[in-house]
Amino acid sequence: MKIAIVGAGKLGLSIADMLIGGDHSVTIIDKDSEVIERFIAPLDVMGVTGNGKEVVLLNDIGIGGYDYLIAVTDRDEKNIVISSIAKRLGVGKVIARIRDPEHLAQREFLQENFNIDHVLNPDLAVAEEINKYLVEKYTLSNGVLYAGMVSMLEFEVGKIPSLVGKTCGEAAKHLGEVVIAAVSRNGKVIIPRKDDSSLIDADDWVYVVGKRDIIEGISKKVFESGRYTDIQKVMIAGGGKAGFYLAKMLEEFGASVKIIDISMKRCQYLSTHLGNVLVLHGDATDPNLLHDENFEDMDAFVSTTGFDEENLLLALMAKKAGIEDVIAKISRDSFGSLIESMGVDMALNPVDITASHVSRLLQGTKVLSSQMIQGQAELIQVAVEDDMALTGRTIASMRIPDGMMIAAIQRRREVIMPDGDTAIEGGDRIVIVSQLTEAFDLEKLLKTKRGLLG
């Protein structure tokens, strides 16, 4: 598949890095020649210095022969115009990053009148994952995700005390014909290996994959009937776009929300556009401000400022204050081990989430369903075709990386819990659990024998 990316920022480079695994032909366009020289050459893609809005430039690279153009510059207006021009010049489909709430409110109008096929909004994606986590935790949910005849269940290990102290393999055998495909521990989602000897803790959350009837049977044991108490009090540090979207969602759900931002201008905007949310002007790292606003009494604390270091500091303060659910937006993968040691309940990287969304769009009908796991991993169901590189191969021969697992196979009316000797056949539906950081290897796994996905 031939793909052009306009904008060589974090998201553009992350998407490019992911796509290389699928053997796509990728071109990156950016106005900064230094960025092109420093970052593009190592990726083994074509770099073009120039303005993606220029018709001459787009014609020079033959945009009409491309399957996709992805516009991810730093401004919504640029992305809208670039996408519209490229579509008129004949590119197959266009994807535009559009982040501002004002633009999102008229999304359908923009897509229809500017011929934009898909819209990316990293801030909204992060807010949706946080909202889903909080709302589902505090309301009744059977925890089951369905993928054809295969299902996945998420639950806290403490619900089945006999699992504590067992390895993932031992715990799976204890539950029946299932696989423990992921473990959430101290804010980090881990995909266990077959030979993993680490022991399950009572505070862990596990994600169990198996036949639908077995999973539903386990669900009845770990989820009580009735309704939990709705989440009551949430504090959000950072009134940027992610904080704004989250506050709006939680407000609509009925939670009492406080949002703190250091910019008076931003606070005025938030006050105007959020109805029943208490907007506080101040520094969220100020202990006196937090104490005055009953920080310790919150059910959940979410840090979505524009600085990773500040989000980590705030998360640590919230954990020390005894707040049950602490969530942080983090943009750098290098902080992963630090987050785990802090015990943050959930850490999300908007770049990883958005790159994953792009991957699903490009894979089209091959991906039958997908579901995020705490914003760090995903469960996807893939329809295996005869020309895919994995068809006819055993799982052991694929050398699947540690952060990924083929958890189950649906072959006609049969569900197979595979091992290394199991071979994939055309027509199978395979269920893959993968960390978002393994996007490159996931693309590589799903490519066709001719090196293309489409």
Image (cartoon, rainbow, N blue to C red):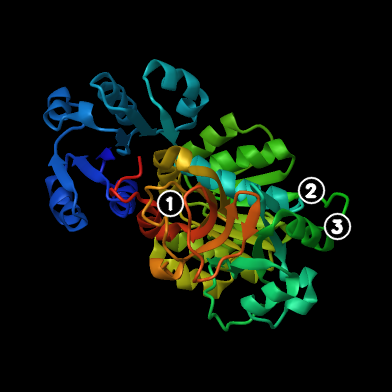
Does 346 sit left or right of 36 as displayed? Answer: right
Q: Give 443 or 393, whichever is nearer the viewer.
A: 393
- Image coords of residue 404 (percent x, y): 48, 64
Q: Which mark is residue 306?
A: 1
Mark 3 crowdedness (10 Å alpha carbons): few <14, some 14-19, many ≥20:
few
Residue annotated with mark 3: 224
- Image coords of residue 328 (percent x, y): 53, 58
Residue at the outermost right position: 226
Earlier sequence position, callout 2 versus callout 1:
2
User: What amino acid is labelled 3 in the image?
Assistant: Glu
Identity of the residue drawn at 14% across and 33% down? 61
Identity of the residue drawn at 38% across and 25% down? 116
Q: If the image is split into quadrants, where does the N terminus sit? A: top left
Does residue 318 lie above or below 85 as drawn?
below
Q: Distance between the residues labelled 3 and 1?
A: 39 Å
Res 93 seen here: yes
Q: In which quarter of the image is residue 89?
A: top left
Does residue 408 lie above or below 87 as drawn?
below
The secondary element bearing badge 3 is classed as loop
- Image coords of residue 102 (percent x, y): 48, 26
Viewer-nearest of labels 2 and 3? Answer: 3
User: What amino acid is labelled 1 in the image?
Assistant: Gly
Residue annotated with mark 2: 230
Res 264 seen here: no
- Image coords of residue 430 (percent x, y): 53, 54
Residues at circles 3 and 1 in contact by the CB criterion of under 8 Å: no
